Each structure stands twice: as structure tokens, then as C-alpha cells.
Image: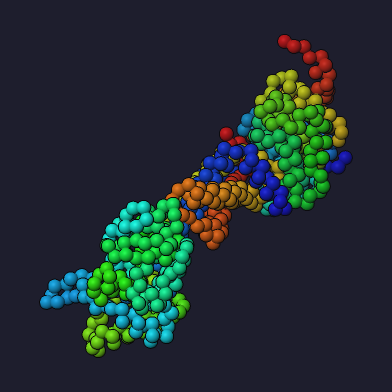
Amino acid sequence: MKWNRIQKIALQSIMKNKMRSILTSLGIIIGVCSVIVMVAVGQGSQAQIEKQINSLGTNLLMVFPGISNQGGVNRGAGSRNKMKLSDCEAILEEAVHVKYVSASVRSGGQIIGGTGNWNSSVEGVSEQFLDIKDWDLESGEFFTAKDVKYKKKVAVLGKTVADELFPDMEAVGEKIRINNTPFTVIGVLEEKGQTGMGNDQDDTILAPATTVLTRLKGKDKINMIYVSANSLEEIDAAQSEVEEIMRREHDIDYGDDDDFMIRSQTEITKMASETSETLTLLLAAIAGVSLIVGGIGIMNIMLVSVTERTREIGIRLSIGARSRDVLTQFLAESITLSFIGGIIGILLAVGISLFMNNFTGIYTIINPTIVFLSMAFSAAVGIFFGYYPARKAANLNPIDALRYE
Amino acid sequence: MKPVIEMNKIVKNYVMGDVIVRALRSVDVTINESEFVAIMGASGSGKSTLMNIIGCLDDVTEGNYQLDGSDTNSLNKDQYADIRNQKIGFVFQGFNLLPRTTALENVELPLLYDRKERIKNPRQQAIKALESVGLADRIDHVPNQLSGGQQQRVAIARALVNDPAIILADEPTGNLDSKTSVEVMSVFQELNEQGKTIILVTHEHDLAQYAKRTIVLRDGHVIQDNKVEQQQSAKTVLANWIEE
């Protein structure tokens, strides 16, 4: 018997029992839909975490001060700070795998200027800071190596600070006072938005590290060093170079512990994406269970349907259907139902994730592989859970089936 | 006259646990082309068993059964299915139409299972069959929009559609009132006049009068095989029908 005739018979049967068909497919629809949406949510959050980490900077290494542990008293991270600006210069000069270096000196206080005042943080950095952070200016210009060298009192405002102090006017060229020290605004940064933690990255002021150290802090210890490797591949090489240079600069003997810590961006990315990968896997597993439950639902309804349609099967057998025709018909019905259910599930999943992207804060990414897999899986469910009821129907005796009430 | 059915010493036993039920004990029947035979008998006489065997729904324990010139012994399930599809048209007591399926689709069904695809245009053939039972204007109706008599005529059209060697009717009027029963019989008589071989299984003596020949079974034996002396014309009966 030709396949298209069987398919026609199966389709007829599905169309003539719409309610039953919809209920049968529902399990698969929900199953496929939840698998795709769950994975989309998982991968969406993964992508967002990675994006946030990448916004820290490009090919970034961060050097932090080490831990002080004197006389058994552990003073915690950063308690043993020996990092100075000279470390940055040494790294920039000697490390071949390193492209940009910037110190970071954090200060803060009341900023007065323009139309009012505002409390913000001030970060002292080098002229390469924007390249490391992959950050641009909205207006004006950034300070130069010369400005850093001569400890110029120039400042570049974050978008938030600029908007607060100079709401309706050009900030560049104006004077501000940070803790009573006058600075000239030479540029305004473009908006960068919030970090994953909700911190406003635009509520900051950048100034030359040298100026901040001498004018605002009055000491020579820096808070951290940003190092940007030449490329992603060179991060590891850059890390060992930086470590070597830092140990030499700090006169650490062979065998002694570092008095600093180096964290690479890839390390942080890896940690974060491992967490969210586990989460995605967990979500997919839960959704996968619902897909299997949907398959069992199909088997249930097909089994009930065999009993309910015993007479129909008897009629078909008596007018010349072979067992194989009946088997194929029931199998085709369950495969079609689960396949159509799969397609509806996919469409529903696309709709839901578009809705989530546009109307909720949840960011989702639909993975074509998962779409394909769940589609294949739903067809497999149709075959697997459809076979037993189909075989049961095909093996009915036509005489008994015709008499069945 | 060419014989359509030749049954030679047919024995059929059913094994039910420890008991052997001897449903048919050596039955010899020959039915020729264009005959209209009523097979009669009380329940338990073996007439249903005989019908199942004639209809290739069941196999024989002993004996030889030839249908339309071909031996039906030692065939497998699929070959039986093909014979049912090509040589036999069934009409049942309970009509046995597919629910929620139009008359046309019901009639078309046997042609869809014809793996030789002898009939190239199933739809056209189904419409022709429905026309021949006078239901040309009901082709798009589903069974529960049709009266009992109309449903049975759809079933007859379905039995006709693949141009079978025999039409096998099992108590075709059992669910119908007496006037509709006569109407159905008139359809059978008309088909018989066109040359169709019709085998009617019934326990009603009144209906047997519309056939040309009656075979009576009792306890698995043929006890009577007569020509009907005065075949009643269903058309005449209908014309003289007096509503009670």
C-alpha cells in the first residue's frame, strides 16, 4: 500500500477527531515548548553573564594586592598592599604579551561644579584605560601620557556625573572641585550602563592616577592594576610574565608567596558560565521529563483509542486492510500527532521567548540545535510510544473486532 | 453457470479450553454466479461460522473452499485480507460505517486498501456506487445525518465499489423497520438482476422469500437446500404497501 494513501487515512482520522488529537498533542506541545524555552532562558542568562564579564575589558588581567597574614592574624584581601605605579611602568616596558596597562587608584568625595554638587567616586587611571575597557568618549578628549606624567588636574566625567552637574550645558571646559581640589573637565564618557550587580558604571570620574595619588590620596599605593593582553590566546602567557615582573619588582624570594593576586577574565568567565551551564542542564532535564510524560500521554490516548476504535479496525480489516496497513495507520497517526505537536511547541516556544525578550527582563536565546533535537525527539516519542498500541490494533481478529460493542 | 463458491466437506471446530465446539460438520455448498441465496438457521446452527468462512474472515479446519475459481486453503492473513478486498463486499447488521466520515469517504475506503490499484479514480467509482443505490444527493452526509435505511444503502455501496465476486450480507435488515427492510431487499434484488451474486445470512423466513434459493443449517449440517418457488418482488411489495 502506498505511503500517501496511509498518510491520507491517518490524517483523515486525526481531523475527524479534533478534540482527541489536540489533547493527545498537548503533552508533546508542552514538552517541546518547555525544553526549548528552558534552554533558551539558560543560554540567554549565560550569554548575558558573559557579556557583562566582557564589558569589564578586553583580554583582561587584574592584579590585586595580596593578603597580610602577620602573627597568625589574617587581615583579608588587599591588606598587604605593596603595589605602586612603578609596577605598572615595569609591566608596560617589559612584558611582550601585554598591550595596555593601567593602574587604578580609587578615591571619592563631594564634587562641586556646574549647577550643583554630587557625591561620586574618582578613579585614577592611565591614559590607556579606555583601550583596556573598550570604552569611548561622548565628547571632549581623554588625558594623555603627558597629562599623567605631569600630574595635570584634568578629569573625564562619567555620563551620570555629567548629567547631574551639568544638566543642560556642555561639561567640557568647565571647572569642578573634587574635595576642594580644582579640576578641569576635558571629556565626558559615553554611557556604559549598569553592571550585572546593578552598579551604575557611569557614576564615576576618571583622572590621571598620578594626580589622584598626590592630590586626593596623598600616598603612593595603588588599588589594582589592569593589564590587557595582546589577544585572548596570549592571556596565559601575559599572566606568567606579569607575575614574574611583579615578583621581581617586589623583591620576593624564590619559594616565598606572592604579595599580589592575578585574576584573568577568562577565569571569571569560565566560572560564571560553568554555573549557568549547570543551571541550563538542570532546566533542560526537568523539561525533558515533561517531554517523556507527554510521550506516555500519547501512548495512553492511543491505547484508549484502539479500544474505542475496535469496531473501526474491524471494518477496515473486513474490507481488506492488511494488519500492516492498520499498524502503519496507527503509527502514522501517533507520529503525525507528535510531529505536529512538536511544530506547535516550537512556534509556542519562539513566541514565549520573544515575549520574554520584549516584555520581561529575562533574556533568552533560542538554540537551533535544541529545536532540531526536540523535534527529532518528539517524532521518536511518536514512534516509540505509538508502536505498542498500533501493534495491538493490527493484531485484532476481524470477527471479534466487528462484534465489539 | 460458473460456480463462484465451491465448498467441499467443510469442517470447522473451535477449541474453547478443554471443549471442542463443532460449528460445521461437513458442509457441501456450491453457489453459482448471479445467484441470490439466503442462508438460514437458528442461532447456534453454524450460519455465522459459515458466513465467516465464505467471507474469508476465518479459515476452515478441514475441507476445501474455492472462491471465484481460486483455492483459499493455506493462505496467510495478508492473502485473506487481499481476497476480502477484491472478491467480497460485506454488508453488516449494524451498518458498520466509520463515524464522522462522509458517505463518499466511507464508500471510497475499500479502494484505498487495494494495493493493485485496479481502479484509477477511487472518488469517481465511489460516486458511481452511491448513485447505483440511489444516494447521489447524500454523498457529503456523515452517518448520523442519515436514516437507518440510507446508512445501510451506503454500506451496500461500499460493498459494491470494488466490483466483488460476491456480496455477503449478514442480517442486513436486523436494525431496520419492516418497510425499510423491504427497501433494502429491493436494492439487493436490483443488484442481483444486474448479475451480482448475493448471499444473505438471516434468520427471518419473510426475507428469504426475496431470494432465489434458501440454504437451511442446523447443528452444523445443511438440512435443506431449495429453490424458492415464488420469489417475491420487493418492488411490488413496496408498491402495495399499506401503512398500518
> Relative to the observer, which residue lies in front, A110 or A126?
A110
- A278 left or right of A328? left
Q: Can residue B29 be spotted in the picture?
A: no
Residue most extreme to the left: A71
> Relative to the observer, which residue lies in front, B24 or A223?
A223
Q: Position of residue B63 (x, y in %)?
A: 70, 47
Q: Is residue A38 depicted above or below A400 in this figure?
A: below
Q: Can residue A369 be spotted in the picture?
A: yes
Q: Is residue B154 depicted above or below A295 in this figure?
A: above
| Residue at 67% over, 42% down | A12
- A343 left or right of B244? left
| Residue at 54% over, 61% down | A369
Count numbered badges in the picture. Answer: 0
| Residue at 73% over, 43% down | B110
- Please identify the quadrant where the C terminus of chain A is shown: top right
Q: Position of residue A354 (x, y in %)?
A: 52, 50
Instruction: Give residue B85's quadrant in the image.
Output: top right
